[in-house]
Image: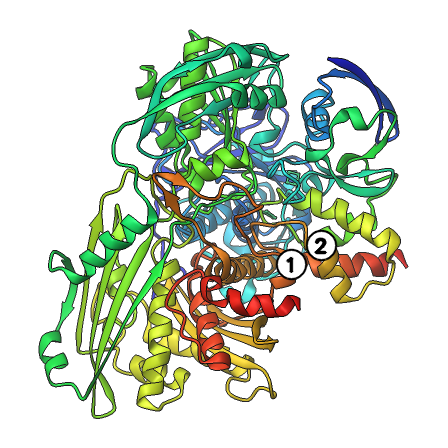
Amino acid sequence: MASYNLKVNGKSVNINVDDDTPLLWVLRDELNLVGTKFGCGIAQCGACTVHLDGVAVRSCSLPVSSLEGANITTIEGLAKDELHPVQEAWKELDVPQCGYCQAGQMMTASSFLKDNPNPSNEDIRNAMNGNLCRCASYNRIEKAVALAAKKMS
Amino acid sequence: MENQNKITFSRRSFIRTSALASGGILIGFNFFTSCKEAAVPPVDVSQLNFNDFNAFIKIADNGYVTIFSPNPEIGQGVKTSMPMIIAEELDVPWEHVSVEQGALDTNNFTRQVAGGSQSIRFGWNALRETGATAKQMLVNAAAAKWGIEASSCSASNGVITSPTGETLGYGDVVNDAAQLEVPENVTLKATKDYKIIGKDAVNVDIDKIITGEPLFGLDYKAEGMKYVSVMRPPAFGQKVSSFDDTNAKSINGVSDVVQFGDKIAVLASNTWAAMKGKKALDVQWTNDGTLESTADHDKKLNAILDGNQLDIRREDGNVKKAFAEADQVLERTYESPFLPHNCMEPMNFYANVTADKVHLVGPIQTPAGTARRIANLIDRDEKDIHLEMTRMGGGFGRRLYGDFALEAAEISNITKQAVKVVFSREDDMAAGIYRPAIKYRIAASLKDGKVTGYHLKEAAINNNMYGLIPHFFPAGAIDNYKVETGNYRSNITTGAWRAPYTNFLAYAEQSFFDELAELLEVDAVQLRLDLLKNVKDGQDPDIQYSAKRMTDTIKLAAEKSNWGKTREGVYQGFAAYYSHNTHVAEVVDITLKNGYPSVEKVTVAVDCGIVVNPTGAKNQVEGGVIDGIGHAMYGDFSFDKGKPQDVNFNTYRLIRMRETPTVHTYFVENDLSPTGLGEPGLPPAGGALANAIKAATGQLLLKQPFMSVLKKYEANLKV
Ligand code: FES
Ligand code: FES
């Protein structure tokens, strides 16, 4: 067990966990931020996607020992005062089916749009390819990313 | 076809009301059953009792309505669409309605199951009658206040209007209404007057989903609970012979290791420690039966198809004679592998077994049956069992089986601790209840340019097609027709998987029809339309598809897809199928990239009766179609000596966004009762895709997944 300091959704937190504990389980079990989901544990599905210093990463495969002092944003912190444009687009287009994968989808999309404000459909499909949706809500995800881009411009 | 306004329930026997202590009225009602004679809804909503009623409507004295939705949500949208039906007949603005999932207690539920795409179909009448009855009570209360005949008043958008134009809001009369008798006769709205049904309503949980609030089973926590990882036999046909838990117990956070049956549970203070503890177990396994491999199944299923031990499930005319007299016979064998469900949320369940109560929480499609099995398993009275359902991160049939809930209850019963069993993805894929491997052999006889005989044999693992499936199209369309089934009992656990049996049967038959059309030199769509002309609707009670509805659906798909008129380089494939009371036709458009098929577009026509919530309905259709395409292309799952060969997404391939076509959905417009949508979009997709690939490449696809054949082309893509 060791003590780690992280900044999560703008707040400093201190936790005591084994050094190989993935960020995913720190968030879910220790910090009670259960919006970040577990899907595969091996960086294949994207359900656990969060932002590390603004960049989308797979929290299931990031041991906490590599994160001392890191700045993490989860789905719970994506909206600032208002919903993030990605969240708005997701709502407007009624994207979710079961909803389980959608936090990860939105975290991938929001990080992608920051660097690519005017994506083509091709860009969107490539950017979102790493996030599985077993309900196959892919058509709406694609449209929602495009809509969010429009909202942000 | 049933009359929309037929009265099928006696309202007095399924609706009761009470005045709420805080003001307003609470209406308790039951789907499909009568409530208990003495049942009375509580006067305090926090005391909702789901034993006597399985659903409630609260109308507050400000006119706002809360509907406590009775059905579990696996993503098929019933938590939104069912309340829409009540709100329509109650005639309140949808914005004034909120929906909550009841903290469900299961003792009295009859059909509190999400599966089989049937929630809407069964709820349609009861929900409309309940809404209409509630509205009538409010009108009666207003009329009494005004001292006039209720029949002279009207109600709309939460406001009651007298003949002289006076108005009262629903909220103004709820307290009076609570004192009135439940009216016996109500009129339902005409379809043309619908204001909520048929309009898009966004999923009622949307705000919680997009902000990451706890909703799912995996998100549930209770003070002091232990997280549990379970070691199960790595192969079907094995059991524990001995184990050493020294290393597991030395892991920080691991508190207990217990064996139950052939499984070993590791309890820990967090999920990661439980998972690590499981990996650190040193277990010796011994064989406890045959260790079966996919190659064995292949042989067994072929032997069934070649043998004569099959059960006849439907037989018309004389198939033998038709084949003997044929000009030409076509015979094909189609095969599909086992498939895991792979719900995005892995299986999990919470259990706390104490002296006075058994508390269970989690994602489950069959709460009532599971509660009963748990009572049996741990030898408790059924009334001690309190099972709460959470939202489910996908179901696809997997959560019909309560194995994971039973595990949690058993572990809690042994350890006397509150526990939450969490499957890893590997656990989820390796301890599955799989779609069984199946083979179909289909033969048809052709004479004088017509299909004269049709003979289908099914060889499947553990079980066979059920219910009315042997009577689906083309039953009724071909004079000499025979369906036979046989099975091989395996120790690999199998069960329902989205659109059971038809998910593969439709592909086999619809690919077969494409070849028949070629032999007969008719257009593939025309062949279906011609065959449907032989069917007389309503003549055979076993034949539930409608030739008329199917014909209209097929024509709509052909029209919207520009069937036969696409631009150069686009190849089309067609399939149509009736399942779960819904008629669906699909056209897949593909192009070739270096010889490899790229699925561009799917045009879908659906007749599901009245579409309650179009946005939700389209979501279901899109999901079903892409799911069908994904699994037909990539779903591959095999066993070697009882051991699943793929247990995570690094080697088990699911469809991803880049491979996903755009789905265009069109609904046949009519005012018939709504039918299911969670499943029927899936079955035709694989067949339509196979037919498009055949049109483009000439390649026959007799085996799923198609990648087993197409891999060589995919390699081209990368160069
Ligand atoms: S859980 Fe992290 S990528 Fe799947
Ligand atoms: S919405 Fe169910 S997994 Fe994506």
Q: Amino acid at mark 2?
A: Met
Question: Which residue is more in the foreground, A1 or B9?
Answer: A1
Question: In the image, what residue occupies the spot 50% across and 63% down?
Answer: B629
Q: Nearer the viewer, residue B287 or B370?
A: B287
Give how far across and how far down residue B650 sits, in percent.
58, 46
Image side of residue B28 versus residue A91, left or right: left
The type of residue carrying mark 1 is Met
User: Is residue B638 at least partly visible in the picture?
Assistant: yes
Find out whether the residues at labels 1 and 2 contact each other: C-beta distance under 8 Å.
Answer: yes
What x and y, as percent, mark residue B499?
Answer: 40, 55
Tag 1 secondary structure: helix
Badge 1 crowding class, 10 Å Cα cut-off, few under 14, some 14 to 19, many 20 or more, is many
User: Which residue in the structure is indicated by mark 1?
Assistant: B657
* Ligand 1 visible in quadrant: top right
Count of marks placed on residues: 2
Q: Quadrant of the N terminus of chain B?
A: bottom left
For residue A36, what is the image quadrant? top right
* Whether the residue under disc 2 has CB within 8 Å of ligand 2: no
* Circle 2 SS class: helix
Whole-Å distance between the Cαs marked 1 and 2?
Answer: 7 Å
Above-or-below relation of B252 to B104: above
Q: Residue furthest front?
A: B719
Above or below, B394 relative to A11: below
